[in-house]
Image (spheres, rainbow, N blue to C red):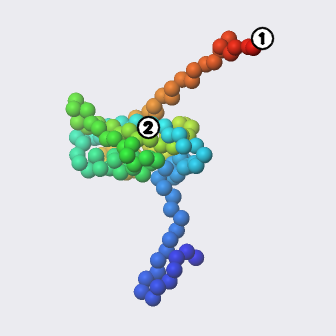
Amino acid sequence: MWGRWTPWLRVYSMPVVSGAEAVGLERRAFAPFSMKVFVTIALTVPALKKHWRQMRGVARVLTDAKNSVQVSQSARRPKQLSVSFSVPKARQAEVVDGIARRFWSWMDEYGTCSISFESEPRRKRRSGKSLRRLP
């Protein structure tokens, strides 16, 4: 049994699962790398302040760095909101469904959703010729 007893109040403290862990993004101490996620939601109505708050709220639940959340809207598309945020590095195929479900469940007037990930920089190849051999 968790918690402690007080005569007028029973206080429970249970293990809390964060939003990132709920969609398969475990926080790993040995892998400090993050990847950038871009989510675009097409709404059925023009975006209101509540939609901006909802987008920011979902992203803040999923992110590993609260200051990485950025919500934006195109001047030409009033029914579309975009958000970018970082998440702990993971296989994209494993986390994309959880991210989409979280936005779908939190957003009002949800139309369609597009999720993309920032491309990783290519690693430079080392050629065998660049190594000098001593005589």
* On-image quarter of the C terminus: top right
Q: Nearer the viewer, residue 130 or 117?
A: 130
Mark positioned earlier in the residue sequence (1 or 2)? 2
Q: Which residue does the image show at 43% across and 83% down from the upper left?
A: 9
Please give left or right for residue 30 compared with residue 128 in the image: left
In this view, 57 is above or below 35: below
- Residue, far right: 135
Can you give x and y, in whole percent of width and height, for residue 28 in the image?
58, 48
Secondary element type, mark 1: loop
| Foreground tag (1 vs 2) | 1
Question: Which residue, given by chain and number where applicable, does mark 1 sit on?
Answer: 135
Can you give x and y, in whole percent of width and height, for residue 24 in the image?
54, 47
Can you give x and y, in whole percent of width and height, for residue 126 in the image?
63, 18
Q: Which residue does the image show at 45% across and 31% down from the upper left?
A: 118
Label 1 Cα crowd, 10 Å radius (few <14 / some 14-19 / many 20+): few
- Residue, far front: 135
Q: Which residue does the image show at 58% across and 76% down from the upper left?
A: 1
Q: Nearer the viewer, residue 95 or 18?
A: 18
Please give left or right for residue 49 compared with residue 7 in the image: left
Secondary element type, mark 2: strand
Badge 2 amino acid:
Val
